[in-house]
Structures are given as structure tokens and as C-alpha cells.
Image (spheres, helix red, strand yellow):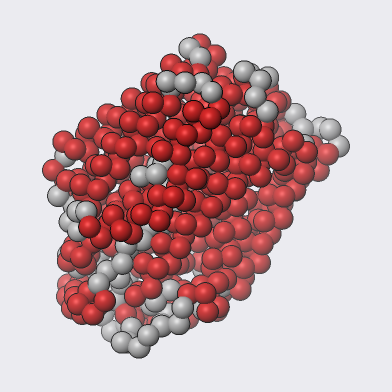
Amino acid sequence: MTTTPAPAASPVEATPCVQPALRRQRDYRNWWCADTSALLAGSVYGFAIPLLLLAVTGSAAQAGALAAIGSLARIGLLLLGGSLADRGNRARLIMLGGLIAATLTASLALISWIGRLSATILCLGHVLLELRGGLFSSSTDAALKDVVHPTQLGRAMAANQGRDAVLSLGGAPLGGLLMALGAAPTLAFIACFQLLTAFFGRKLAPALARAERQAAAEPDYQPSAQGIVSGIRWCFARPQLRTILWLMVAVNLGTNGVMTALVYGLRERGESTISIGLVTASLGVGLLLGSFAAGWLIDRVRTGVLACLSLSTLSLCLLLLAAGEQLWWLGLMLAAAFLSVPALNAAIGGYFMALVPRDLMGRANSVMMLMAMLALPVGLVSAGAGIQLLGLAPTVTLFALLTTLAALAAWGSSHIRSIPHPADWSAAAATPSPTASASAAKRKLRWDRAQSARQGLEPHSQSIYL
């Protein structure tokens, strides 16, 4: 998601001078390390927790229900976490979130090592970890705008898309390998990387404090209304964003349901954790290959049309996934399905972020995450029950049909089809919002036009929203 905020809101002066490469900027390197450590820990945990729950319960349906409880816990605190990211010290929040996660996972690792990891203890730990995720997960994303110059946000987020693909590619096999060693080594690995998140969050403190001072010193600075409701109202006041958010519910229910059904279904039929990890890793292959073409596509295809085409590709390949149960076929179709996701993220995610002012970034991100996760508990429960009652192929087909309906709804929505080319995102971002002053909006429009004329808006993405 691309955004070009007013120059004073950036930690770097918005001047025509050429900025150093991102890899040469210490603040960005610290942010990248903090974010990557958290994402790697989350990737391994997300792969391991369904298998751990399945091992301690012996039932796919029960494991799905327990995983759903954790997702509901995270969802319950997402909006509060976004509000904290806008009002609090973001570096401190990143550090505190990492320390809490490290403590919880290290405790679970110790309990597992001594042979006392029961379903009750694992479920309690999972719920606490998900509560922590809801409260602190918005802080890192919100901090990126404070450490990267506006003209380099495109490059930073494009790099994130490739990084996310690599983590998706490597996280599942790594999780499978660790799970083959046991629950204790897996949980200890996660704890170590959460500690790294806290360490690099502490190193971000000077940069984030500097950015906050510079934003407050802007003559036309007028902070948005505080509170959770104002962030929700801001997002849902725009027809395109409102439609996007509701479509995300259906797409996330479909895609996450397919992935959960695959993990449970393959495990139920006796596949090893390493084999399941390799199949799941094919998703990362698709993301990685798709990230190479995302920039080219977003430059040449209107954003709304590109989103519809990407959703159509995703839904078709997920439907074909159920046509065979061989591991190679499942991996091939997963890779093909997620080829289109980087372009979809760059298009829709970029348009969303183009509209968000700095002091609403945490709440806007939390609203987007909430909508992405809203149907996740239903998907977890339905996937577990579907595997037991229907089997793998029918369950996958039902979830794939949801993504097909979302693709058809996108094609039928003028709000989605009319989303403009990235070159016109700046005009949309300059439209005064209920929480922004008119003078700030006009100044932002002038600056955005100057930037667009000088170098053009660069596409970028933030994370995988599907």
C-alpha cells in the first residue's frame, strides 16, 4: 500500500536531493530486522500451532475449535492495539510485544520439555499469545512511515513483499523440521526470534521519537480524532475502502479455510510434518515468483481491473486444487493460486495506504487486519469439522467457492473496477477526510503532484492480506 504523506511528517526532509539506498539507512535496517524477526517467529508458530493442538487433542475438530478461540482473542484486541499504536510510543510497544511473546513461548517450551504440555495449558498459552498479537501487531507496520522517506516507501514495501514471500517459502519447511525435533525446540526457536524483535524495537526508539517531534512541529498539523470509533468511521466512510474491506472477509475465509483444511487433511491421512511443510511452502514459491511481476503489472494495468483479474486467478486455481490429492498436484496448484497475490496486495493495499494519514496509520491497519481476520475463526472450525465429516477434497472445494464468489462480486462492483491507476492515487489521498484539515490536504496535494511529476508513484505492498 503506497502513501506519500506531507514532507514534515517524514523523519527525513522532503527535498529534491537523492536519498541513500534503503540498505544504507540504519533506521530502516533496524525496522526491517524487527519486522522480519516477528514475521519469521509468527510464520513458524502459525505452522506449528495447528499440529500441536492436533497432537494434544487427537481430533481435527477440537484442534480447529481451540485455534478459533485464539483467533477470536486476537480479533478482540486488534482495534485497541491500533489505537495504542497511534497514541503510544511505537518503539516501546514493539519492544514490549516482543518480550511478552518471548516469555510466553519460552514458558511453553519449558513445560513441553518436562512433559507437562496438556491441551489446557497449550490452549491457554495460545490465547495469551493471540491477545498479545492483537494488542501489539499494529505498531511495527505503523512505524514504517516514521523511518522511511516518502519517496522511498514504494521501494521499502516492494522489498517487504519479496521478504514476505521468502518467509512464506521457508517458514513452513522450517516449522516442519522443528516439529520433527519436538514441540520444545520449536517453541524455543520462536522465543529467540521474538527476543530479537524486542531488541531491534529498542534500537528504533530515537528515530520514532524524532519523527513524532517533526510531525508535531508542522504548522498545519492537526491530529485526527482519537479513539477506536474514529478509525473505523474513517475507513468505512469511503465506498471503495468499504467494499474492499468486506471482500477481504470472504477472500480470507476462503483462502485460510483451504490452507487449514490442507494441514489437517494431510495430517489425518498420515503425511509427515515435513511433507506438509513442503506442500505449504509452495505457497511461498508462488508469492516469490509473483512478486517479480507485481511491479510491472501495477504500472500497466488499472488498479481495479488488476484486482479483479488477480482474484479470478486465485479462485480458479483453488478450485483446481481439489481435482487431485497427490502432494505434487496440491503444491503446484497452491503455487499457481498465489502467483497473483503480490500484484493484488500491491494494487489494493497500495490504494488503501495512499489514503491514510500518519496519525491514523495504526487504527487503519488494525481495521484492515480485523476485516482480514473476521471470518478466520469460522474457517478454522469449519475446516476441522469439514475434514472429519466430508474429507479433504469437498472441504477445499467449498472454501474455494467462497473466493470465486468474492471474485464475481469484485467484477460486479463499480467501486472496485473504478479504482484508478497508481498515478492517480495521490489525488484520492489529497481528498480532505473528516479528520484532516483543509489546508493540510491542499498542501499535501501540491507536494504529491510535484513528486509524481518528478519521479512517479511507485507501487508497493505491505503484507499478504489474503
Foreground residue, 430 or 176? Answer: 176
Q: Is residue 98 left or right of residue 35?
A: right
Identify which residue is drawn at 58% across, 63% down: 34
Q: Is residue 14 left or right of residue 181?
A: left
Q: Is residue 111 left or right of residue 277?
A: right
Task: Give the image location of residue 315, x and y in percent.
Answer: 33, 32
Q: Which image quadrant for residue 198?
A: bottom right
Foreground residue, 54 or 238? Answer: 54
Q: Is residue 290 above or below residue 354?
A: above
Q: Quadrant of the N terminus?
A: bottom left
Q: Quadrant of the C terminus?
A: top left
Q: Is residue 317 visible?
A: yes
Q: Which image quadrant for residue 441?
A: bottom left
> Residue lying furthest top in this view?
389
Foreground residue, 44 or 282? Answer: 282
Tally of numbered discs: 0
Identify which residue is drawn at 71% across, 55% down: 192
Identify which residue is drawn at 32% across, 87% down: 15
Task: Give the image location of residue 249, x and y in percent.
Answer: 35, 37
Identify which residue is drawn at 26% across, 76% down: 455
Task: Give the image location of residue 218, x and y in percent.
Answer: 32, 82
Q: Is residue 427 above or below residue 243?
A: below
Task: Give the image location of residue 339, x and y in percent.
Answer: 39, 44
Q: Is residue 212 visible?
A: no
> Residue lying furthest right in this view?
114
Foreground residue, 376 or 454? Answer: 454
Q: Is residue 81 left or right of residue 435?
A: right
